Amino acid sequence: MIQRQHLLALTGPELVSFIGELGEPAFRARQVFAALHHRRLRSFEEMTDLPKELRAKLDSVATPSTLNIESRYLSADGTRRYLMKTHDGLPVETVFIPEERRDTICFSSQSGCPLQCSFCLTAQLGLLRSLTPGEIVEQVIVALNDAYGVGQKPQHGTNLVGMGAGEPFLAFESLMKALSIIADPNGLHILPNRVTVSTAGIVPRIRELATVSERPHLAVSLGAPTDEQRNVLMPINRKWPLAELLGACKEFERSLKRGERFTFEYVMLRDVNDSDEHARQLANLLNRHELRVKVNLIPHNAAEPLPYHPSSRRRVESFKSILEAKGLPAFVRRPRGQDIFAACGQLAARREANPAQV
Ligand code: SF4
């Protein structure tokens, strides 16, 4: 079977060449780009401003959508989780988080994940494959259409976070291309400064991102303040230990532009990495590297069969105040969508929650 071109994977200029090869003028390509990204249409039949013959021609060689929405889960706090399947049957999960001032879409960069972070359910799937640029763009379109209606303008601004399933820096090319398509002013027009990408610590890519001018914000997941513990919780640390990781972070920090955010994330696991001593070790580590970034504390989201529990509120507060006393701004991230397995570290294509209507 000939694989049809996924049109969401093409930038504006690439779409002009693709449509040009079909013998069509550039204005048709602009029409198709607007239909896909501005009106967020997911089938050629809906593109009624295009001649019928062109729609048939396109349909024989291309497709506007490849993700199949299998289930949609709605949390009591308004968070929505979408479980989708790729054309080759692999799970993709996306989360929409409504907020007062801006809504956030958390997208996945891989189906499953090859990194074995011991506190994360996605790790148990292993790597199925990295997602294509089109599959990343399509997740955003699906979530926006569901939250606001097809083609309807979002009521709030939209932030994107690359914190769903997978390690985004192992799908770096797909990610960067998807972000450039998403930024197009004739389409979704969500600029890189509205996007935050989280890495478990793929050092060469942190260095590479530091050289990119239009780039997303960076968040680095630490999980432990010592190599000994991080080797266990986040085995990627054996390849790039803390000194190397923080060296790359320092380089990244030097390249920060005005208004650019740079965050460390620290998942808090009860009686594992949440003592006052851990907080002091973390603060000393960051201060030793003279990193003045903020730290987001993320209470672990219980996810069976993982052997971890969330830290108590008191523990989190004590940890936070130790960091602050040592000059590090610290914030506690409020968990969202726990009841539908949509929270951090819970994405593993689970079907147990009651699906809302697809
Ligand atoms: S925390 Fe992120 S990088 Fe680690 S296993 Fe889970 S999805 Fe992969």
Image (cartoon, rainbow, N blue to C red):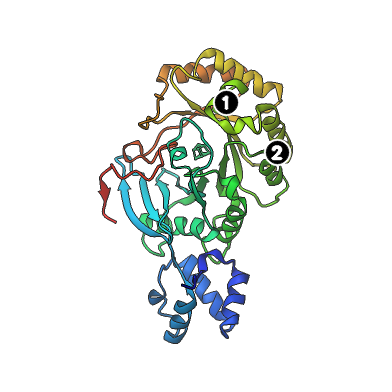
Residue 252 is labelled as 2
Instruction: Give the SS element for disc 1.
Output: helix
Camera-side residue of 351 and 41: 351
Relative horizontal placement of residue 244, taking residue 69 as reference (left or right): right
Q: Is residue 207 above or below residue 283?
A: below
Residue 344 lies left or right of residue 239; in this view the side is left
Query: Which x, y percent locates residue 44?
Result: 42, 75
Quarter of the image for residue 282 reads top right
Outermost residue to the front? 1
Q: Secondary structure at mark 2?
A: helix
Q: Is the residue indicated by label 2 positioned so its CB lies within 8 Å of ligand 1?
A: no
Viewer can see residue 50: no
Disc 2 residue type (three-letter): Phe
As drawn, 13 above or below 336? below
**Given the image, on which type of amino acid does mark 1 rest?**
Arg
Q: Quadrant of residue 75?
A: top left
Relative side of 210 to 230, left or right:
right
* Distance (Cα) linking label 2 and label 1: 21 Å
Query: In the rendered view, would you say 323 is above or below 98?
Result: above
Nearest to the observer: residue 210 or residue 258: 210
Q: Position of residue 223 (x, y in %)?
A: 54, 27
Q: Residue at x 71, y 25 (%)?
A: 289
Q: Earlier in the sequence, mark 2 or mark 1?
A: 1
Please name the residue shown 26% across and 54% down the image.
Answer: 357
Residue 250, image x, y percentages: 71, 33
Which residue is depicted at the point 46% across and 20% down? 316
Residue 230: numbered disc: 1
Q: Residue at x 70, y 21 (%)?
A: 288
